Amino acid sequence: SSSSSSSSSSSSCSKMKHTTILEALFAGGVAGICVDTMLFPLDTIKTRLQSSKGFSAAGGFQGVYRGLCAAVIGSAPVASLFFGAYETTKYLLDAEEGGSHYGATAHMISGMVGETVACVMVVPTENVKQKVQAGLHMSAYSSLRAIIKTEGPWGLYRGYLTTVFREVPYSAIQYPIWEALKHQLVIKHKGCAPSSWESGLCGAAAGAIAATVTTPLDVVKTRLMLCSTDRKGVRYNGTFATMKKIAQEDGVAVLFSGMIPRVQFNVLGGLIFFSAYERALRFFREHVNTRSSRE
Protein backbone atom coordinates (compact mmCIF):
# COMPACT_ATOMS: atom_id res chain seq x y z
CA SER A 1 0.00 0.00 0.00
CA SER A 2 2.92 2.32 0.74
CA SER A 3 4.30 1.78 -2.78
CA SER A 4 0.94 2.59 -4.34
CA SER A 5 0.60 5.80 -2.31
CA SER A 6 4.12 6.89 -3.25
CA SER A 7 3.45 6.19 -6.92
CA SER A 8 0.20 8.18 -6.82
CA SER A 9 1.93 11.12 -5.12
CA SER A 10 4.72 11.04 -7.68
CA SER A 11 2.25 10.97 -10.56
CA SER A 12 0.46 14.05 -9.19
CA CYS A 13 3.75 15.78 -8.55
CA SER A 14 4.69 18.54 -11.01
CA LYS A 15 8.48 18.58 -11.38
CA MET A 16 10.42 21.80 -11.93
CA LYS A 17 10.93 22.44 -15.66
CA HIS A 18 12.96 24.82 -17.80
CA THR A 19 10.78 27.74 -18.91
CA THR A 20 11.16 28.49 -22.63
CA ILE A 21 11.03 32.06 -23.94
CA LEU A 22 7.62 31.45 -25.57
CA GLU A 23 6.20 30.14 -22.28
CA ALA A 24 7.66 33.13 -20.41
CA LEU A 25 6.26 35.66 -22.91
CA PHE A 26 2.77 34.12 -22.75
CA ALA A 27 2.63 33.66 -18.96
CA GLY A 28 4.16 37.08 -18.29
CA GLY A 29 1.59 38.80 -20.49
CA VAL A 30 -1.34 37.06 -18.77
CA ALA A 31 0.07 37.85 -15.31
CA GLY A 32 0.65 41.51 -16.20
CA ILE A 33 -2.93 42.06 -17.37
CA CYS A 34 -4.36 40.30 -14.28
CA VAL A 35 -2.42 42.30 -11.71
CA ASP A 36 -2.69 45.71 -13.37
CA THR A 37 -6.45 45.44 -13.90
CA MET A 38 -7.24 44.20 -10.39
CA LEU A 39 -4.99 46.60 -8.47
CA PHE A 40 -5.33 49.75 -10.55
CA PRO A 41 -7.38 51.77 -7.98
CA LEU A 42 -4.75 51.22 -5.28
CA ASP A 43 -2.03 52.35 -7.69
CA THR A 44 -4.03 55.53 -8.46
CA ILE A 45 -4.38 56.36 -4.74
CA LYS A 46 -0.62 55.85 -4.24
CA THR A 47 0.19 58.18 -7.16
CA ARG A 48 -2.08 60.90 -5.75
CA LEU A 49 -0.57 60.58 -2.27
CA GLN A 50 2.87 61.18 -3.79
CA SER A 51 1.80 64.17 -5.93
CA SER A 52 3.27 67.54 -4.89
CA LYS A 53 -0.26 69.04 -5.38
CA GLY A 54 -1.53 67.00 -2.47
CA PHE A 55 -3.93 64.05 -2.37
CA SER A 56 -7.23 66.00 -2.61
CA ALA A 57 -6.02 68.40 -5.31
CA ALA A 58 -4.76 65.45 -7.39
CA GLY A 59 -8.25 63.91 -7.37
CA GLY A 60 -8.63 62.19 -3.98
CA PHE A 61 -10.83 59.11 -4.28
CA GLN A 62 -12.58 60.36 -7.42
CA GLY A 63 -12.10 58.52 -10.75
CA VAL A 64 -9.67 55.91 -9.44
CA TYR A 65 -9.91 53.99 -12.73
CA ARG A 66 -8.64 56.92 -14.83
CA GLY A 67 -5.74 55.77 -16.99
CA LEU A 68 -6.72 52.08 -16.83
CA CYS A 69 -6.70 51.80 -20.62
CA ALA A 70 -3.03 52.87 -20.85
CA ALA A 71 -2.08 50.49 -18.04
CA VAL A 72 -3.79 47.45 -19.59
CA ILE A 73 -2.39 48.14 -23.08
CA GLY A 74 1.11 48.42 -21.63
CA SER A 75 0.95 45.68 -19.00
CA ALA A 76 1.02 42.62 -21.28
CA PRO A 77 4.11 43.58 -23.35
CA VAL A 78 5.89 44.90 -20.23
CA ALA A 79 5.47 41.66 -18.28
CA SER A 80 6.19 39.59 -21.40
CA LEU A 81 9.43 41.48 -22.03
CA PHE A 82 10.45 41.13 -18.39
CA PHE A 83 9.91 37.40 -18.09
CA GLY A 84 11.34 36.71 -21.55
CA ALA A 85 14.57 38.45 -20.54
CA TYR A 86 14.47 37.07 -16.97
CA GLU A 87 14.05 33.40 -17.91
CA THR A 88 16.58 33.69 -20.76
CA THR A 89 19.21 35.22 -18.43
CA LYS A 90 18.48 32.55 -15.81
CA TYR A 91 19.05 29.86 -18.42
CA LEU A 92 22.31 31.47 -19.63
CA LEU A 93 23.56 31.71 -16.03
CA ASP A 94 22.55 28.08 -15.38
CA ALA A 95 20.20 29.30 -12.66
CA GLU A 96 17.54 26.63 -13.18
CA GLU A 97 16.36 24.77 -10.09
CA GLY A 98 19.26 22.73 -8.75
CA GLY A 99 21.66 23.85 -11.49
CA SER A 100 23.08 27.20 -10.39
CA HIS A 101 26.47 27.63 -8.77
CA TYR A 102 25.88 31.39 -8.38
CA GLY A 103 23.08 31.23 -5.80
CA ALA A 104 21.06 34.42 -5.31
CA THR A 105 23.45 36.40 -7.51
CA ALA A 106 22.16 34.70 -10.67
CA HIS A 107 18.55 35.55 -9.82
CA MET A 108 19.59 39.08 -8.89
CA ILE A 109 21.30 39.59 -12.27
CA SER A 110 18.35 38.01 -14.11
CA GLY A 111 15.91 40.37 -12.38
CA MET A 112 18.08 43.39 -13.18
CA VAL A 113 18.36 42.44 -16.86
CA GLY A 114 14.62 41.77 -17.05
CA GLU A 115 13.71 45.15 -15.55
CA THR A 116 16.14 47.12 -17.73
CA VAL A 117 14.59 45.56 -20.86
CA ALA A 118 11.00 45.95 -19.60
CA CYS A 119 11.49 49.65 -18.77
CA VAL A 120 11.55 50.38 -22.50
CA MET A 121 7.76 49.79 -22.33
CA VAL A 122 7.19 50.63 -18.64
CA VAL A 123 8.24 54.29 -18.78
CA PRO A 124 6.01 55.54 -21.65
CA THR A 125 3.06 53.66 -20.12
CA GLU A 126 3.72 55.11 -16.66
CA ASN A 127 4.15 58.64 -18.01
CA VAL A 128 0.80 58.55 -19.80
CA LYS A 129 -1.02 56.74 -16.98
CA GLN A 130 0.21 58.83 -14.05
CA LYS A 131 -0.72 62.16 -15.64
CA VAL A 132 -4.28 60.86 -16.07
CA GLN A 133 -4.34 59.49 -12.50
CA ALA A 134 -3.17 62.85 -11.10
CA GLY A 135 -5.94 64.70 -12.97
CA LEU A 136 -3.65 66.50 -15.44
CA HIS A 137 -5.50 64.93 -18.41
CA MET A 138 -8.88 63.26 -18.82
CA SER A 139 -7.85 60.30 -20.98
CA ALA A 140 -4.81 58.26 -21.95
CA TYR A 141 -5.04 59.54 -25.54
CA SER A 142 -5.10 63.22 -24.51
CA SER A 143 -2.21 62.59 -22.11
CA LEU A 144 -0.16 60.95 -24.88
CA ARG A 145 -0.86 63.79 -27.32
CA ALA A 146 0.02 66.47 -24.75
CA ILE A 147 3.33 64.82 -23.86
CA ILE A 148 4.40 64.50 -27.51
CA LYS A 149 3.24 68.05 -28.31
CA THR A 150 5.02 69.76 -25.38
CA GLU A 151 8.11 67.58 -24.93
CA GLY A 152 8.38 65.58 -28.14
CA PRO A 153 8.53 61.75 -28.35
CA TRP A 154 11.40 61.66 -25.85
CA GLY A 155 9.06 63.21 -23.29
CA LEU A 156 7.50 59.74 -23.01
CA TYR A 157 10.82 58.62 -21.52
CA ARG A 158 10.97 61.36 -18.89
CA GLY A 159 12.03 59.64 -15.66
CA TYR A 160 13.51 56.62 -17.50
CA LEU A 161 16.73 56.46 -15.46
CA THR A 162 14.82 57.07 -12.23
CA THR A 163 12.44 54.24 -13.11
CA VAL A 164 15.37 51.94 -13.90
CA PHE A 165 17.07 52.98 -10.62
CA ARG A 166 13.80 52.15 -8.80
CA GLU A 167 12.87 48.93 -10.60
CA VAL A 168 16.34 47.37 -10.78
CA PRO A 169 16.93 47.50 -6.98
CA TYR A 170 13.33 46.33 -6.50
CA SER A 171 13.87 43.28 -8.70
CA ALA A 172 17.36 42.69 -7.28
CA ILE A 173 15.64 42.30 -3.88
CA GLN A 174 12.35 40.66 -4.87
CA TYR A 175 13.37 37.92 -7.29
CA PRO A 176 16.19 36.28 -5.28
CA ILE A 177 13.79 36.18 -2.27
CA TRP A 178 10.97 34.75 -4.43
CA GLU A 179 13.27 32.09 -5.91
CA ALA A 180 14.78 31.24 -2.49
CA LEU A 181 11.35 30.79 -0.89
CA LYS A 182 10.21 28.64 -3.83
CA HIS A 183 13.40 26.57 -3.51
CA GLN A 184 12.56 25.87 0.15
CA LEU A 185 9.12 24.63 -0.93
CA VAL A 186 10.72 22.36 -3.56
CA ILE A 187 12.88 20.83 -0.81
CA LYS A 188 9.82 20.50 1.44
CA HIS A 189 7.82 18.85 -1.38
CA LYS A 190 10.76 16.52 -2.20
CA GLY A 191 11.46 17.89 -5.66
CA CYS A 192 7.91 18.83 -6.63
CA ALA A 193 7.20 22.33 -7.93
CA PRO A 194 5.19 24.60 -5.61
CA SER A 195 1.56 25.24 -6.51
CA SER A 196 0.56 28.51 -8.16
CA TRP A 197 -0.81 29.85 -4.87
CA GLU A 198 2.35 28.89 -2.98
CA SER A 199 4.41 30.71 -5.61
CA GLY A 200 2.08 33.69 -5.19
CA LEU A 201 2.59 33.74 -1.42
CA CYS A 202 6.36 33.67 -1.95
CA GLY A 203 5.99 36.61 -4.33
CA ALA A 204 3.84 38.53 -1.82
CA ALA A 205 6.47 38.19 0.92
CA ALA A 206 9.27 39.19 -1.45
CA GLY A 207 7.24 42.14 -2.75
CA ALA A 208 6.58 43.52 0.75
CA ILE A 209 10.30 43.69 1.54
CA ALA A 210 11.31 45.15 -1.83
CA ALA A 211 8.51 47.76 -1.83
CA THR A 212 9.43 49.09 1.61
CA VAL A 213 13.11 49.54 0.75
CA THR A 214 12.51 51.25 -2.61
CA THR A 215 9.66 53.66 -1.69
CA PRO A 216 11.91 56.82 -1.75
CA LEU A 217 12.87 56.05 -5.36
CA ASP A 218 9.18 55.62 -6.20
CA VAL A 219 8.32 59.04 -4.72
CA VAL A 220 11.11 60.69 -6.76
CA LYS A 221 9.99 58.93 -9.96
CA THR A 222 6.38 60.07 -9.45
CA ARG A 223 7.35 63.73 -8.97
CA LEU A 224 9.62 63.70 -12.02
CA MET A 225 6.95 62.12 -14.21
CA LEU A 226 4.28 64.57 -13.04
CA CYS A 227 6.66 67.44 -13.90
CA SER A 228 6.22 68.68 -10.32
CA THR A 229 7.93 71.80 -8.95
CA ASP A 230 9.55 72.54 -5.61
CA ARG A 231 8.36 75.30 -3.23
CA LYS A 232 10.16 77.95 -5.29
CA GLY A 233 8.37 76.87 -8.45
CA VAL A 234 11.48 75.22 -9.93
CA ARG A 235 10.83 71.94 -11.74
CA TYR A 236 12.40 68.84 -10.18
CA ASN A 237 15.24 67.44 -12.28
CA GLY A 238 17.50 64.44 -11.68
CA THR A 239 16.98 61.49 -9.35
CA PHE A 240 19.38 62.28 -6.53
CA ALA A 241 18.92 66.07 -6.77
CA THR A 242 15.16 65.58 -6.43
CA MET A 243 15.57 63.23 -3.48
CA LYS A 244 17.86 65.72 -1.72
CA LYS A 245 15.48 68.64 -2.37
CA ILE A 246 12.44 66.74 -1.07
CA ALA A 247 14.34 65.77 2.10
CA GLN A 248 15.50 69.38 2.66
CA GLU A 249 12.18 71.11 1.97
CA ASP A 250 9.62 68.59 3.20
CA GLY A 251 11.60 66.25 5.47
CA VAL A 252 12.86 62.70 5.06
CA ALA A 253 9.46 61.25 6.05
CA VAL A 254 7.94 62.62 2.80
CA LEU A 255 10.25 60.28 0.85
CA PHE A 256 8.14 57.46 2.30
CA SER A 257 4.80 59.00 1.21
CA GLY A 258 2.40 56.37 -0.02
CA MET A 259 4.48 53.55 1.48
CA ILE A 260 1.49 51.74 3.00
CA PRO A 261 -0.57 51.55 -0.23
CA ARG A 262 2.65 50.77 -2.13
CA VAL A 263 3.44 47.83 0.16
CA GLN A 264 -0.21 46.69 0.05
CA PHE A 265 -0.14 46.98 -3.74
CA ASN A 266 3.02 44.88 -4.00
CA VAL A 267 1.85 42.25 -1.50
CA LEU A 268 -1.46 41.80 -3.32
CA GLY A 269 0.32 42.27 -6.65
CA GLY A 270 2.89 39.59 -5.81
CA LEU A 271 0.15 37.17 -4.80
CA ILE A 272 -1.88 37.75 -7.98
CA PHE A 273 1.05 38.22 -10.39
CA PHE A 274 3.11 35.16 -9.48
CA SER A 275 0.03 32.95 -9.01
CA ALA A 276 -1.23 33.99 -12.45
CA TYR A 277 2.24 33.51 -13.95
CA GLU A 278 2.56 29.92 -12.67
CA ARG A 279 -1.04 29.11 -13.63
CA ALA A 280 -0.54 30.51 -17.16
CA LEU A 281 2.73 28.56 -17.49
CA ARG A 282 0.95 25.31 -16.67
CA PHE A 283 -1.93 26.14 -19.03
CA PHE A 284 0.53 26.81 -21.86
CA ARG A 285 2.45 23.57 -21.20
CA GLU A 286 -0.67 21.43 -20.90
CA HIS A 287 -2.65 22.85 -23.83
CA VAL A 288 -0.40 24.72 -26.27
CA ASN A 289 2.81 22.68 -25.98
CA THR A 290 0.92 19.38 -25.88
CA ARG A 291 -1.14 20.28 -28.95
CA SER A 292 1.92 21.43 -30.96
CA SER A 293 3.85 18.27 -30.02
CA ARG A 294 0.94 16.11 -31.24
CA GLU A 295 0.91 17.93 -34.56
Image (cartoon, rainbow, N blue to C red):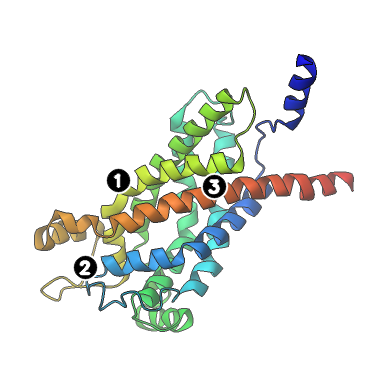
Three-letter amino acid code of the residue under disc 1: Val
- Residue 111 in view here: yes
Question: Which residue is tagged 2?
Answer: 236
Three-letter amino acid code of the residue under disc 3: Phe
Q: Would you identify the image quadrant in which residue 196 lies? A: top right
The CA distance from mark 2 to mark 3 is 35 Å
The label number, if any, that marks residue 213 in the structure image: 1
Residue lying furthest top: 2
Task: Estimate the x, y position of residue 143 in percent, counting from the top left.
Answer: 42, 80
Q: N-terminal of the two: label 1 or label 3?
A: 1
Mark 2 lies on a secondary structure that is loop
Q: N-terminal of the two: label 2 or label 1?
A: 1
Mark 1 lies on a secondary structure that is helix
Mark 3 Cα-neighbour bin, 10 Å: few <14, some 14–19, many ≥20: many
Question: Which residue is tagged 3?
Answer: 274
Q: Is residue 199 above or below residue 53?
A: above
Residue 249 shown left or right of residue 36 in the figure: left
